[in-house]
Amino acid sequence: MGTTTRRLATFTGRGYDKGRGTLQCAAWALVAEPLQRSVLCPPSVRTRILRAFGAQIGDGTLIRHDVRIHWPWKLSVGENTWIGVGAWLLNLEPITIGSDVCISQGAMLCTGSHRADDPAFEFDNAPITVADGAWIALRATVLRGVNVGEGAVVGATALVTRDVPAGERVLAPVSARA
């Protein structure tokens, strides 16, 4: 196996589209995003802010404080879904979350990566979909391109790099005590 020498100065970000212009990205990053993350921001106001910036959020959805959302216009959430404190939706590409889904505290959904074999380290991004009734538990991580099926459970601290079929449970590895 050969090695790739990274030449990060050659990175261009080619193919990546933020989805909005500089002014809207700046307004989100500097004003709206910190406001909606605040514990002082009521969930109903948080939802209105996200919708004003293009997020599609169904009725009855509860997004708690300190939830990080990279680009709200690349987020779609169904009805009666819960997104817990400290979850991070790093959605360089679209994240679609169904209805009656629980994204627990500290969970991360990350649509971005880089091409490890590319000296310029260009993006290797892909969307994430979480189907109705799924549960992404405490501090679990779902990476780019993954589809989590209906009613599936991704256990606490699990790392998911491949699709999870409907109804399947993915558990984090267990380490034995010495």
Image (cartoon, rainbow, N blue to C red):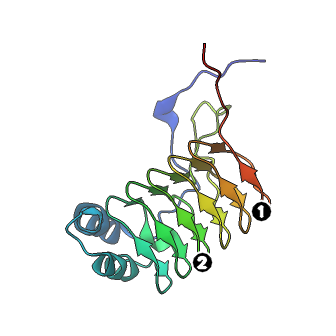
Q: Looking at this view, name the residue that lies furthest to the left.
A: 40
Question: Residue sitting at 33 percent across and 82 percent down?
Answer: 48
In the image, residue 142 sits, relative to residue 40, either above or below, namely: above
Q: Nearer the viewer, residue 143 or 178?
A: 178
Q: Earlier in the sequence, mark 2 or mark 1?
A: 2
Q: Residues within 10 Å of mark 2 (few under 14, many from 20)?
A: many
In this picture, residue 69 sits left or right of residue 143: left
Q: Quadrant of the N terminus?
A: top right
Q: Quadrant of the C terminus?
A: top right
User: Alpha-carbon distance for marks 2 and 1?
Assistant: 15 Å
The mark found on residue 99 in the picture is 2
In this picture, residue 80 sits left or right of residue 44: right
The mark found on residue 1 in the picture is none
Determine the secondary structure under disc 2: loop
Determine the secondary structure under disc 1: loop
- Of labels 2 and 1, the one closer to you: 1
Q: Looking at this view, name the residue that lies furthest to the bottom.
A: 59
The mark found on residue 167 in the picture is 1
Q: Nearer the viewer, residue 178 or 36?
A: 178
Question: Residue sitting at 36 percent across and 66 percent down?
Answer: 64
Three-letter amino acid code at the position of disc 2: Ser
Residue 63, picture quadrant? bottom left
Three-letter amino acid code at the position of disc 1: Gly
Q: Is residue 145 visible?
A: no
